[in-house]
Amino acid sequence: MSESSRFPRPLHRTRLYEQVAEQITAWISENDLKAGDRLPPERQLATSLGVSRATLSQALVALEVIGVVAVRHGDGTVLTDKPRAERITDAIRAHAERIPDVIEARDALETKIAALAAQRRTQEDLDHIQAALKAMLDDIEGGGRGVQGDELFHRAVTEAAHSPLLEQMMSEISELIRETRIESLSQPDRPRTSLAGHQKIADAIAAGDPEAAAAAMHGHVMLVSDVALLRDR
Amino acid sequence: MSESSRFPRPLHRTRLYEQVAEQITAWISENDLKAGDRLPPERQLATSLGVSRATLSQALVALEVIGVVAVRHGDGTVLTDKPRAERITDAIRAHAERIPDVIEARDALETKIAALAAQRRTQEDLDHIQAALKAMLDDIEGGGRGVQGDELFHRAVTEAAHSPLLEQMMSEISELIRETRIESLSQPDRPRTSLAGHQKIADAIAAGDPEAAAAAMHGHVMLVSDVALLRDR
DNA sequence: TTGTCCTATTGGCTAGGCCACTGAGCCGCC
DNA sequence: GGCGGCTCAGTGGCCTAGCCAATAGGACAA
């Protein structure tokens, strides 16, 4: 690439804190750190990076805003599990427990997702969905509630829709959904009913029938949600 | 809601820089500052806020990461044009222009929103919707494309749904929607067709018919989107 | 008119220090 | 044995004071 051709280059000047933030994230992935792991103490980290504590602090603020770390006074700096998302989650939870809102949002997203999945699923997607179904069945037969399989199923369906934006949105409310899910599956006999609903959705997706998939998903969300609705208020 | 029932609350502790950042944004909206306007110099701002420059600097880093301001060495701190709504927008746009994704997401959200609006709209909501419709009509009669009225309409409908979570999600993709909208309304005669679609949605909402509202909204989104789809190979 | 230099202004970053919070271990009292 | 309070080391929160570096704009020379 000729240097002269792109002459009017704005020449982005990076601040020190940005470089520091990058180094930290690089270090995190290099050492394969997971959520809950700790960064070194500020003083130590600052000296080993060759910057002042103030600058390091700026970098940590940036990482905190992005949602990579949580800085805890008197304790240390720990990695967050959700590298993104959840701005919404916090906002909602802070305001009040708005379970009905979550259900509405979930219904809006997942109904569409199911329809798209029916049109776009690959064989691999179907395999994932089946695997999730099996995991849920095994768990329930073993006396469990199939919580994990349930989550896996919905994630597999979401992926099968092949719509990055919808997937992103689902991930943003996934935590809120999880709360309603655990509660719902605690109802006696609910796991089996839920499993049947899942099977219906999976069949429609496998058959490539968008309307049926959407309807099945809608029914499922409504079923799973009534408990939460009862609890609310 | 009884206070004692939700007792074990984590009790979020705010850092000084967060409060500072909030005060700054508040000050921005109070004084109605626009993109390009300048914040006071750091030293001055710091003393008037009663914090050290280091802390103010942290707040500015946070605001910079969020995308509210741009801090320029030797020049000053200026406001950025995009006040909010970023994360997702950026992520999507950075990856590629994924117009179809936007349409899918919009369809998922707005169909549900329309249905909810039909059930929950107050008289005030209906007034807002009518006002938006009128604004759009006036603009078109005057030779305009009704872009602003269009946006107003969808916002009014979204508010009428009274679902904070869905509203939040809409606001997150609103910028992406705007791009498709401008394009669509540029088509000759499209504004009038679009207006008719809006009228149909408004009628269904006023009549309190969720299914009809959802169907009308779905049709509208599809209509508005075909142009974008054509462009997107 | 043009280009150079100077300078006031403004952000960038550091050093060093004190304060506040957290968690763990210890101790004494039921 | 268990519960509560105490102490203390470690860690982040924030400040003061200061120098360095970039920018914009005016003065001035060619």
Image: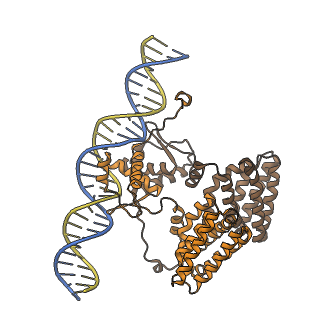
Chain colours: A orange, B brown, C blue, D yellow
Q: Quadrant of residue A205?
A: bottom right
Q: Quadrant of residue C18?
A: bottom left
Whether residue B130 sits left or right of residue A55 in the image: it is: right
Percent across and percent down for residue A113 are 66, 65
Front residue of this view, candidates B120 and A112: A112
- Number of callouts in the render? 0
Percent across and percent down for residue B50 are 38, 51
Whether residue B212 sits left or right of residue B75 in the image: it is: right
Q: Residue at x 71, y 73 (%)?
A: A215
Q: Residue at x 82, y 54 (%)?
A: B193
In this rendering, is residue D25 above or below D29? below
Image quarter hosting the C terminus of chain A? bottom right
Q: Residue at x 63, y 67 (%)?
A: A126
Q: Residue at x 48, y 48 (%)?
A: B64
Whether residue A68 sits left or right of residue B86 in the image: it is: left
Image quarter hosting the N terminus of chain A? top right
Percent across and percent down for residue B83 are 56, 50
Percent across and percent down for residue B71 are 46, 42
Q: Do we see residue A36 in this rendering? A: yes
Whether residue B151 sits left or right of residue C16 in the image: it is: right
Front residue of this view, candidates A8 and B80: A8
Front residue of this view, candidates B11 and A207: A207
Q: Do we see residue B120 in this rendering? A: no
Front residue of this view, candidates A228 and A124: A124
